[in-house]
Amino acid sequence: MLPVDARMQGVIARQDGLYMLVYKHPDGTQEARVIGSIVEYLFAPDDPRR
C-alpha cells in the first residue's frame, strides 16, 4: 500500500465510486465510458480488521 492509495480513497468517494475509461480506437476516435463497479474503497491501514 502506497500513500497515493489513501488519496485515491478520497477521490473515489467524491465520485460516488465512479470512474471513466476512455477507449482510443485505431482510427483516432475516442469513446468515453463511465464505470460504476466500485462499491466501497477500503484502505487497510485505516481499519486493518475490516
Image (cartoon, rainbow, N blue to C red):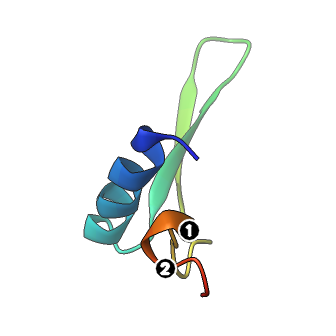
Q: Quadrant of the C terminus?
A: bottom right
Label 1 neighbourhood size at 10 Å, few (<14), some (14-19), many (20+)? few
Type of amino acid at the residue the image marks with label 2: Asp
From this view, report whether residue 45 is shown above or below residue 25. Answer: below
Q: Any mark on residue 27, and which?
A: none
Q: Quadrant of residue 29?
A: top right
Left-right relation of 23 to 7: right
Q: Look at 33% across and 70% down and name the residue there.
A: 13
Residue 47, label in figure? 2
| Element type where label 2 sits in the image | loop
Q: Amino acid at mark 1?
A: Ala
For the residue carrying disc 2, how many other residues have a C-alpha within 10 Å: few (<14), some (14-19), or many (20+)?
few
Tell me what residue is drawn at x 41 percent, y 41 percent: 3
Residue 28 appears in which quarter of the rendering? top right
Q: Find residue 40 and report its horizontal and vertical position in percent.
A: 52, 80
Q: Are marks 1 and 2 in contact (CB under 8 Å)?
A: yes
* Identity of the residue drawn at 51% across and 40% down: 2
Q: Residue lying farthest top?
A: 27
Percent of width and height locating residue 1? 58, 47
Q: Residue 39 location in percent, x, y?
A: 55, 81
Q: Secondary structure at mark 1?
A: helix
Residue for point 58% across, 77% down? 48
Q: CA distance from mark 1 to mark 2?
A: 5 Å
**Residue 44 marker:** 1
Q: Check the image and name the residue furthest to the bottom.
A: 50
Total marks shown come to 2
Give how far across and how far down residue 24 sits, in percent.
63, 23
Q: Which of 30 and 2 lies nearest the eye of the viewer?
A: 2
- Is residue 38 or residue 50 the one in the foreground? 50
